[in-house]
Amino acid sequence: NEEINRIKLISNYEEAVNAFETLCNQFESKYSSYIKMLKTNKERYLSYKKYPEAIRKHIYTTNIVENINSKLEGLRVNHGGYFQSVKTAEISIYVIVNRIIQGRWKKPLTVSKEVLYEIRQIFNSRFTE
């Protein structure tokens, strides 16, 4: 949807909230209970807009299950669409999880170091408001 893509391009939190509200208002008469739920949870949906632009693309998900499943699916496809045995699948899962733990998750993103002060200020502001 063009409106959703426009919201993704907005970098300012307040502008994103206004665009979200406008989009919700377009469908409120047709889907009133669903739109009410969306408006109630808009803070959750748009909170990433409060973070620095450089780090936003890295915080869209932290779901390890999605990460492992996507890597397993890629591995399965590369092996011709299936694993030869349960043992092969188990070994593949172990290797993938181990690589994630030892690699990507062992060291922080370099971009997070650049915006660490801003992130700390955002975190601290949650307790002073």
Image: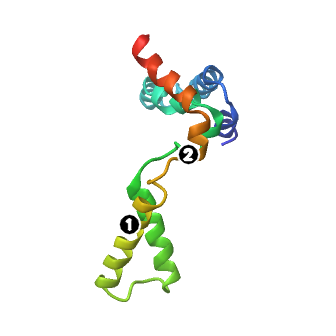
The one of 33 and 114 positioned closer to us in this rendering: 114
- Where does label 2 land, which residue? 58
Left or right: 110, with 77 as reference point:
right
Q: How many marks?
A: 2
Q: CA distance from mark 1 to mark 2?
A: 21 Å
Q: Residues within 10 Å of mark 2 (few under 14, many from 20)?
A: few
Q: State the image quarter where residue 41 is shown.
A: top left
Give the x, y percent position of residue 118.
57, 26
Pinpoint residue 110: horizontal percent, then vertical percent. Answer: 59, 46
Of the two numbered discs 1 and 2 in the rendering, the one whose residue sits closer to the viewer: 1
The quadrant of the rendering that contains the C terminus is top left
Q: Residue 39 or 53: which is nearer the viewer?
A: 53
- Residue at 43% in and 18% down: 126
Residue where numbered disc 1 is placed: 98
> In the structure shown, which secondary structural element does the residue marked by tag 1 occupy?
helix
In this view, the residue in front, 68 or 45, is 68
Residue 14 shows in this picture: yes
Task: Say which residue appears at 65% left-offset and 35% top-offset.
Answer: 53
Sequence order check, earlier mark of 1 and 2? 2
- The three-letter amino acid code for the residue at tag 1 is Asn
Residue drawn at the location 46% of the way across and 78% of the way down: 76
Q: Is residue 87 left or right of residue 82?
A: left
Up-down: is 68 above or below 110?
Answer: below
Residue in view at x 48 percent, y 46 percent: 61
Q: Is residue 56 visible?
A: no
